[in-house]
Amino acid sequence: MKKTLLSFLTIAAVALQANAADLPTTGNVIAEYYTGNGQTFGGWGGSSKFENVDEDGKPCLKFTNEEATEYDWNVQMAIDYDFEPGTTYYIGFDIKGTPAEGITSAFQAKENYAGCGNLTNFDITADWKHVIIYGEPFDAGENGISNPPMRWLANLGKYVGSFYLTNLKIYTEDTTGDDPGTEDPSAKDIVAQYYTGNGQTFGGWGGNAKFDNVDEDGKPCLQFTNPEASENDWSVQMAIDYEFVPGTKYYISFDVKGDAAEGITSGIQAKENYASCGDFNKFNITTDWSAVTIYCEPYDAGEGGVSNPPMRWVANLGKYVGTFYLTNLTIYTEKSSGVEAVAPVENGRTVVFNLQGIKVLDTDNKAEVYDLPAGIYIVNGKKIAVK
């Protein structure tokens, strides 16, 4: 699973609901631009122009691009900032201009322009509109060498026209604790367990790797051994098949020890063509037992009106050389906060809300969901991503 795949961690629920899963409109603000504080930014590429202007009495970045480039990333708007891997960041701003849909943006590493994770897409409308995008960056380092995220950039090569952007704030959720659901057992809905003494096990595939069921320190364990590295980390994978529900945040916790390693990646895969349905935060292996918790909110990878739901968790082990032991693996969710009440299923209809709580579709043809603009929607009470 490649590092440039979308990561939908801590995706928000409908804004009308005041709970921890909501998309926060404010929080711990860490940087501001075009708010009257004199802070600005720009970009590069093609024949595009980045200007600091006043529009409707507001300090703005005016962007103009007269012709499309071959790739969207040939023209980029950018902000340099030392982002913290594993933290969900929100970027909110006001924007108007030549309309466009599905503009992509991402985090970039310090070295070699490596991708550190994507944010949700955004649209531009002719009138002022407040946009919030979000993503959780990761460290793109390899072989023990860190390569942390240090830049946000938006890809504008395919955009033709002009827009005005103002009041941009980068912020994190205002929270005082660990990620929800990682500590309190009473807040968990356990959906599957392996190597807990219940007889449930799993394995994997690839290269010359071995997956054995053993006892270690009196615990039922998966013993994984890989004698040599593969060209790609995903050439060897540890896997669990499970029918994940798109839009639900899943946690996977386990105890692990073995030959030490850092930054192991994992993700959720779709039923068809191994399509990605989201990535988890990375985890490390230490020589002594350590408790690990990773989390991800998968999405349906379907296109053209054809669903392609998430059905497998895979950990990428092709670059790991050595042996580890894994035990006490639990897949769980937080107890429901009642999102389903926002968009009930009525008489087999498909009811869709956007993240502002506005109904955008009510139909008996579910395929129409995939005709909506790219973004996150609540479909019959479940969050999905339309690409």
Image: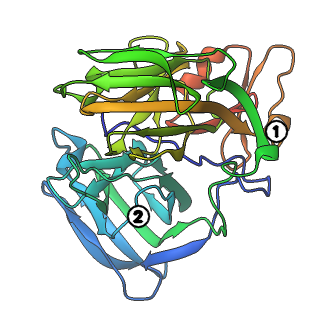
Determine the residue positioned at 30% across, 21% down: 236
Left/right placement of residue 361 relative to residue 316 reads right
Find numbered disc 2 in the image and state the secondary structure of the residue it sits on: loop
Colour scheme: rainbow
Determine the residue positioned at 36% across, 22% down: 237
- Name the residue that disc number 2 marks: 84
Residue 51, located in which quarter of the rendered image?
bottom left
Give percent across and percent down for residue 226.
27, 24
Give percent across and percent down for residue 360.
68, 36
- Residue 208 sits above or below residue 107 on the image: above
- In the image, 319 versus 10, the foreground residue is 319
Three-letter amino acid code of the residue under disc 1: Val
Determine the residue positioned at 84% across, 28% down: 344
Asked whether residue 372 appears in the rendered view, the answer is yes
Residue 166, located in which quarter of the rendered image?
bottom left
Considering the image in quadrants, where does the N terminus appear?
top left
Asked whether residue 383 appears in the rendered view, the answer is no
